[in-house]
Amino acid sequence: MKKYFFTFIMICVAASFSNAQEIVYPAIQGYGGVNEVPFETIKPDPTQHYKFVVEINNRIEDKKELSGYLDYAAKMYNVHIYSGVPKENIDLVFVVYAGSTPITISNEEYKKRFEVDNPNAGLLEELKKNGIRVIVCGQSMMKQNLVPDMIYPGVEMAVSRFTATTDLMNKGYLLFSL
């Protein structure tokens, strides 16, 4: 009886491994992981040009952890690459404001304010490498006593999230909010 029970357990363990989903990072390495979907029947047209602006405003509760919202937004890029859209056909911009503004703070300033390195720094670097723009709201910067020298290198600064987003929408970008 024990032999059969042990065999049954081993079969269940093997079956669980065979059904495990593989997470892939087709462009942004280590962030915005995508589950492989071998049964997809609907794919984006790889010949089209995709333009997205993603607004990120949720308050970052744990300043020691990577922003789940920024990581999720990175998935938008990775999932399009995974689906066969070439990088040159994707324009993605993140507009960060309100409670998410700390994402964009330089490592030095982040350490002063929160006593840890900016956990988003690696992802911000990956976004830059992939040509993804990050814009921070100037109104949010002012409310949080931030000046340009305190912002992560490569992050752009707008008068406000409204002006950044509406300008991009007028240029044909589709709006997504997190």
Image: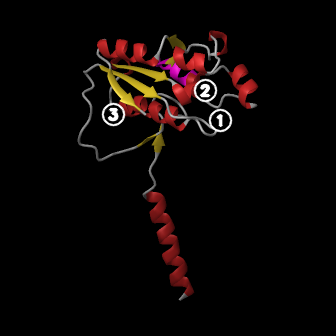
Q: Position of residue 114 (x, y in %)?
A: 72, 31
> Callout 2: few (<14), some (14-19), or many (20+) C-alpha neighbours within 10 Å?
many
Q: Earlier in the sequence, mark 3 or mark 2?
A: 3
Check disc 3 and report the residue beneath it: 83
What amino acid type is highlighted by mark number 1? Answer: Lys
> What secondary structure is found at the residue carrying circle 1?
loop
Check disc 2 and report the residue beneath it: 102
Q: Are marks 2 and 1 in contact (CB under 8 Å)?
A: yes
As drawn, the label of residue 80 is none
Specify the segment rendered in magenta.
125-134
Image position of 140 with respect to 56: above or below? above
Report the quarter where the C terminus lies.
top left
Residue at the spot 66% in from the left edge and 28% down from the top edge: 118
Q: CA distance from mark 2 to mark 1?
A: 8 Å
Residue found farthest to the front: 143
What amino acid type is highlighted by mark number 2? Answer: Pro
**In which quarter of the view is residue 90 placed?**
top left
Q: Position of residue 111 (x, y in %)?
A: 74, 26
Q: Earlier in the sequence, mark 1 or mark 3?
A: 1
> What secondary structure is found at the residue carrying circle 3?
loop
